[in-house]
Amino acid sequence: MSFFKRSRAQDQERLESGLEKTRKGLFDKIGRLIKGKRTIDEVVLDDLEEALVTSDVGIKTTLDIVSRIEKRVARDRYTSSEELHALIHDEIAGLLEKNLPNHPLDFDAPLENNPHVIMVVGVNGVGKTTTIGKMAWRYMQAGRSVLIGAGDTFRAAAIEQLEIWAKRAQVNIIKQKHGADPAAVAFDTVQSAVRRSTEVAIIDTAGRLHTKTGLMDELAKIKRVMGRQVSGAPHEVLLVLDATIGQNAIRQAEEFTRSVEVTGLVVTKLDGSAKGGIIIGISNEFKVPVKYIGVGEGIEDLQIFNRQRFVEALSIV
């Protein structure tokens, strides 16, 4: 438990550092446009709308935020720019609050299933492999036993990369040869987790097959196979999205949430992007909670998403 007490303070510092580009690109701009303002007029609302849209918050979510602010401005009176900062903070935090996870947040929280099976999905290049390695390490640091399944058998280097991360995290890995049936790997992983009384099993999946339909059919097959081994498995389906691609992440989320029962989102590479606002848009549009965020390349740089700390790290209050 002392690990978590120490790391939360460190995580906040890392989060603030990782969100520096987003803060400068969006929220410093918002701070400048309302500096010294005692009221929010049409000019400020128009500027706010432009700042949000150009920072990849998304048109729908931007209109939601501006509309909510406009209603509150019409109802309340504001006497300082600090109050306006707080208003914007509240509205953005409020949108994120509507989509909180209904599964355990902390890595040391009680798990209802043993093993707790997690399937990780997403297109190639978004950071699935590194996310799995970092998740495994976090669970290990919390005292959990972890097993990883190398279910991305289509990409030549995927198995080798996952092996490297498994060694870093000091967890075991189940693998087969390149080109093997991904569902067979998932079956073996869950079966081994049951036999070894492993607490957490994390299954990697392919990010690309020959056709979009083929990928989604394969993911459905993997889910069915795991469900036969452990009731309700997978208990989580995490979709990994790359923050640096902005609105393309929303299109990827549309595709996966249409075909797979996604329970949570992982947004990676926030430290390399000025498009951290994508978290606000994705969470609002898909009603799927952001569970983890990646704020660096280190094994410790996967964080549990905390809406309040996220908004505060963007320095809008």
Image: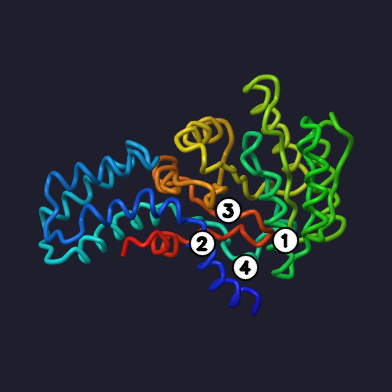
Q: Quadrant of residue 303?
A: bottom right
Inter-mark Cα distance, 4 to 1: 15 Å
Earlier residue among tags 3 and 2: 2
Inter-mark Cα distance, 3 to 1: 14 Å
Furthest toward the top, the residue is: 211
- Residue at left offset 45%, top offset 35%: 247
Inter-mark Cα distance, 4 to 2: 22 Å
Q: Amino acid at mark 4?
A: Ala
**Closer to the eye: label 1 or 2:** 2
Report the disc number at residue 307. Answer: none
**Closer to the eye: label 4 or 2:** 2
Give the x, y percent position of residue 282. 44, 43
**Residue that mark 3 sits on:** 294
**Residue that mark 1 sits on:** 137
- Residue at left offset 19%, top offset 63%: 81
Q: Amino acid at mark 2?
A: Leu
Q: Secondary structure at mark 2?
A: helix
**Residue that mark 4 sits on:** 109
Report the disc number at residue 15. Answer: 2
Q: Amino acid at mark 1?
A: Trp
